[in-house]
């Protein structure tokens, strides 16, 4: 599938500005790599680390690009492939599962006409199963770009959440 | 309710977490002033006298940890606050950071003074990125007021706190993996020795403490009346933050004295099981915790009694309540899937063990397992707990092993398979 906005092979001035800003915020400290990558990912529309950004970042921090890809592929919150603008991350750990997050996944799949791991044709939505993100008191929960939406135990609540996103 | 106390959580809702001035107004940083007049070993002794055990899960004697860290001879040392609260079902640290960030910072500064460190690092899990601005501004305000930086409050002690972010790796809660991650690498645990107390983050001697342990220090130093010691039982004094979740009416974070029973926690504090359902099992201490059967609900919540009842000794303080709507095998498969996903893949027992036990559990769920499969599963689980490199592999199968002991009926062989 072709990515919907960004050209993968070019480093745009916006990306350079984004990387520069984030690196500056982290005091040019290469040991903060994980935090830097998370912040860059937040700033990219489809929430991933594009390849030219990884190369530019490695120059900027004077580290090897292999280290960046080691980190990106190790941590489950970092992605090297484009995701959606709103990735619906459903908790897949025991506290949410015993509160019936399976039904929540089915509801999302039906409402968006989407399978887990797929992206809608316009690149807006995607459903993913992720490990616990510490919102067990409001389970079953979904996290979208860092914001947690809890108590999604009925279809109306799920619809409410989806409407809030757009 | 009367069964909760407020000692670690005494400041919840009492001040504006975004403002240092309001923390000072309610008496913030008096513990730091007191600590700066004390010797580091004296502070460690206060912790030992009160029998404080680390709250991250390993329950190591905290006073001993600090005096050991102090005894290490090195020009630079560091303190790490482990806010990588990855255990599913645990969210007490989230509440501590959100409601009382300054108490955590105060505890960290005292820890730095006590062990003689010059830098402190907070490693917060990536999932809590919404708390990052709050903590960053708290650190900045402390720097402006002279609680952090050079020559803190004229004592000649210089100390800085840095905030680092994780990115969703459960294994980074392990001390040496956390240190790797702090250095900007992937978080794979290191071979020990050298232990992190001698060579940890940035190859410096490192003293790692949980958020709750550090938040406990300031109120404890100011507790001249012996309130903390009067709580709990004689051989396990004090209070503990617990997080209750799962099929209960009122999930949440509570601070309880040690010695309260699990039944009281579930039925009195968390409001009991959701309507019309039966309690089936309780998992204590997160995904790496053992399962308790309903018959064990009257076990007092102390390190000793829990151990005697063959349960996880407190662990991270998570209590996951599961009713009969989830089958035991189904629950074990969820836990197994979690560990299969989170294993870093570095050492063979954990990587292969988790994969094979997952396949065997699928077999049990389908009802096609044989006697040999059960024996094999148990064997793999035992190998993993003895031969893995870090705590993840060692504890990954405690749920399975305890389920085999407490609910043997779910592993029973189906007749037609036994004949075959």
Image (spheres, coloured by chain):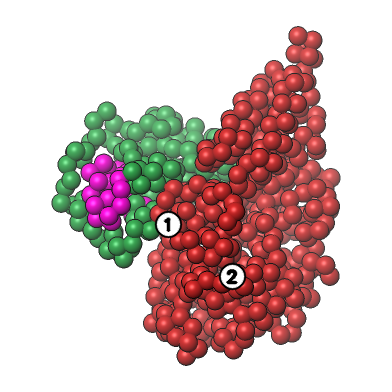
Chain colours: A green, B red
Q: Residue A81's spot in the image, x, y percent?
A: 32, 37
Residue B151 position (above or below residue A62): below
- Give the left or right position of residue B295, taking residue A78 as reference: right
Whole-number angstrom distance, CA of label 2 to CA of label 1 = 21 Å
Q: Is residue A42 magenta?
A: yes
Count the marks: 2
Callout 1 secondary element? loop
Please give the name of the residue rendered at 59% of the width and 84% of the height, measured from the top-left corner: B35
- Residue A86 part of the magenta-drawn span: no
Nearer-the-camera pick, A94 or B308: B308
Residue B29 visible (yes or no): yes
Instruction: State the residue at coordinates (80%, 63%).
Output: B259
The residue beneath circle 2 is B72
- Residue B162, image x and y in percent? 43, 68
Image: B11 above or below B3: below
Query: Does residue A111 appear anywhere in the picture?
Result: no
User: Residue B329 has which mark?
Assistant: none
Is residue B292 depicted above or below B208 in this figure? above
Position of B294 with respect to B339 (left or right) is right
Nearest the eye: B12 or B212: B212
Predominant SS along the magenta part: helix
Q: What is the quadrant of the C terminus of chain B in the image?
A: top right
- Say yes or no: labels 2 and 1 on the same chain: yes
Which residue is labeled 1 in the image? B183
Magenta-colored span: A38-65
x and y, in percent, of residue A21 in the image: 25, 60
Quarter of the image that includes the N terminus of chain B: bottom right
Tell me the residue at 71%/85% (across/down): B224
Q: At x 42% / y 57%, what residue is drawn?
A: B183
> Where on the picture, by quarter, is residue A80?
top left
Q: Is residue B221 above or below residue A76?
A: below
Q: Nearer the viewer, residue B337 or B397?
A: B397
């Amino acid at each position: 599938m072709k990515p919907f906005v960004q050209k993968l092979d070019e480093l745009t001035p916006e990306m350079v500005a984004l990387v520069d800003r984030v690196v500056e915020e982290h005091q040019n400290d290469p040991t903060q790599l994980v935090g830097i990558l998370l912040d860059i990912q937040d700033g990219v529309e489809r929430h991933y680390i594009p390849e030219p950004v990884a190369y530019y970042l490695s120059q900027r921090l004077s580290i090897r690009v292999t280290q960046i890809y080691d980190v990106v592929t190790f941590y489950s919150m970092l992605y090297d492939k484009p995701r959606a603008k709103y990735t619906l991350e459903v908790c897949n750990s025991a506290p949410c599962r015993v509160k019936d997050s399976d039904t929540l996944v089915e509801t999302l799949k039906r409402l968006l006409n989407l399978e887990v791991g797929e992206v809608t044709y316009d690149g807006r939505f995607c459903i993913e199963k992720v490990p616990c993100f510490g919102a067990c008191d409001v389970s079953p929960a979904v996290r979208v770009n860092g914001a947690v939406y809890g108590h999604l135990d009925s279809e109306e609540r799920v619809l409410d959440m989806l409407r809030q996103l757009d | 309710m009367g069964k909760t106390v407020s000692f670690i959580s005494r400041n919840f809702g009492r001040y504006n977490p975004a403002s240092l001035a309001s923390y000072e107004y309610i008496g913030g940083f008096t513990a730091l002033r007191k600590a700066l007049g004390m010797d580091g070993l004296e502070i460690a002794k206060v912790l030992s006298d009160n029998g404080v055990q680390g709250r991250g899960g390993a329950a190591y004697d905290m006073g001993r940890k600090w005096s050991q860290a102090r005894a290490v001879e090195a020009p630079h040392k560091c303190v790490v606050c482990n806010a990588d609260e990855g255990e599913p079902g645990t969210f007490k640290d989230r509440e501590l950071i959100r409601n009382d960030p300054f108490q955590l910072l105060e505890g960290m500064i005292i820890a730095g003074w006590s062990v003689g460190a010059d830098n402190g690092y907070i490693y917060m899990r990536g999932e809590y990125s919404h708390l990052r601005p709050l903590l960053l501004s708290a650190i900045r305000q402390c720097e402006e007021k002279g609680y952090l930086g050079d020559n803190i409050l004229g004592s000649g002690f210089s100390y800085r706190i840095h905030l680092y972010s994780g990115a969703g790796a459960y294994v980074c809660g392990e001390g040496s993996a956390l240190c790797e991650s702090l250095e900007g690498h992937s978080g794979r645990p290191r071979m020990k020795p050298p232990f992190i107390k001698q060579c940890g983050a940035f190859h410096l001697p490192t003293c790692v403490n949980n958020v709750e342990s550090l938040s406990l220090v300031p109120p404890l130093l100011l507790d001249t009346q012996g309130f903390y010691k009067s709580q709990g039982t004689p051989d396990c004094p004090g209070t503990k933050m617990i997080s209750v979740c799962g099929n209960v009416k009122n999930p949440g974070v509570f601070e309880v004295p040690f010695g309260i029973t699990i039944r009281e926690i579930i039925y009195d504090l968390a409001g009991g099981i959701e309507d019309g359902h039966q309690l089936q099992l309780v998992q204590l201490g997160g995904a790496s915790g053992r399962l308790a059967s309903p018959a064990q609900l009257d076990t007092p919540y102390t390190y000793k009694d829990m151990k005697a009842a063959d349960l996880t000794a407190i662990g991270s303080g998570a209590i996951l309540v599961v009713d009969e709507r989830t089958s035991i095998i189904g629950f074990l498969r969820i836990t197994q899937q979690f560990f299969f996903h989170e294993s870093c893949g570095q050492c063979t027992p954990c990587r292969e063990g988790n994969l094979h036990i997952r396949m065997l559990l699928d077999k049990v769920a389908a009802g096609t397992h044989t006697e040999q499969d059960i024996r094999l599963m148990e064997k793999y689980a035992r190998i993993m707990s003895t031969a893995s490199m870090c705590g993840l592999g060692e504890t990954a199968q405690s749920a399975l092993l305890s389920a085999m002991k407490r609910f043997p009926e779910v592993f029973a062989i189906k007749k037609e398979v036994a004949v075959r």
